Each structure stands twice: as C-alpha cells, then as structure tokens.
Amino acid sequence: MDENDETARNWTLIATPPGEEWSGRARYAAAMFFYQRSEMSAEVLEVYRICSRLDAEDPLAVIRDRGIGRDWLAKLGKAGR
C-alpha cells in the first residue's frame, strides 16, 4: 500500500460515523496515524482514545465542547469531513 492509499484509508476510518460497531476503535486507530504524522495534537488524540470504547460517542462533539483542536477541526473541514 503506498502512502496516498494509506492516507486515504485513514481519512475514511476517521470519518466512520458514530454508532457503528467498532467505530470508536477504527477512529482511534486512524487518529493515531494522523498523530504520528504530527497532524493532530496530543489533546485531540486523547479524546479519540477516550471515545474508542464508546462507539456511539462523537469525538468531534467532545473536541468542540472542550474548545480544543481548532487546527484539526479546520483540517477535517477542508477535507470535507
């Protein structure tokens, strides 16, 4: 798998809708990918970690409620997520 395919796959995973079985873990795995590439802060990654076992919880709502991750939210907006 080349880098573009891996990045696209992780964009798909990070956008997994809340409520789907194992969606929290899928989003967290993708979040770790973006964190390791320095595209996400540790604070935002922590939200995805906390939400990883809560499939119905929307990590983006938690991020917004905490007033963190403005850069990450902007990146998602630009990516159409």
Image (cartoon, rainbow, N blue to C red):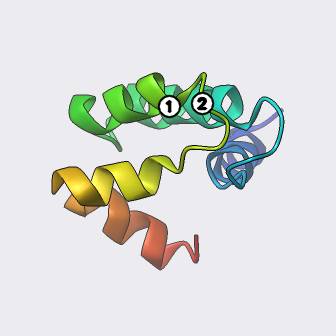
Q: Is residue 4 left or right of residue 37?
A: right
Whether residue 68 is visible to the viewer of this picture, yes or no, is no
Q: Which residue is mark 2?
A: 54
Q: Is residue 64 above or below residue 59?
A: below
The image shows residue 26 at horizontal and vertical percentages of 70, 32
The image shows residue 30 at horizontal and vertical percentages of 60, 35
Tags 1 and 2 in contact by the CB under 8 Å rule? yes
Which residue lies at the image location 76% right of the left edge and 45% below the top edge? 9
Q: Is residue 35 left or right of residue 10?
A: left
Which residue lies at the image location 46% right of the left edge and 46% below the top edge? 59
The span from disc 1 to disc 2 (Cα, nearest Å) is 5 Å
Outermost left residue: 67
Q: Which residue is mark 1?
A: 51
Tell me the quarter of the image containing the N terminus: top right
Please tell me whether mark 2 sits on a helix, a strand or a loop: loop
Q: Is residue 59 left or right of residue 68?
A: right
Instruction: Tell how many labels.
Output: 2
In the foreground, 52 or 57: 57
Q: Amino acid at mark 1?
A: Cys
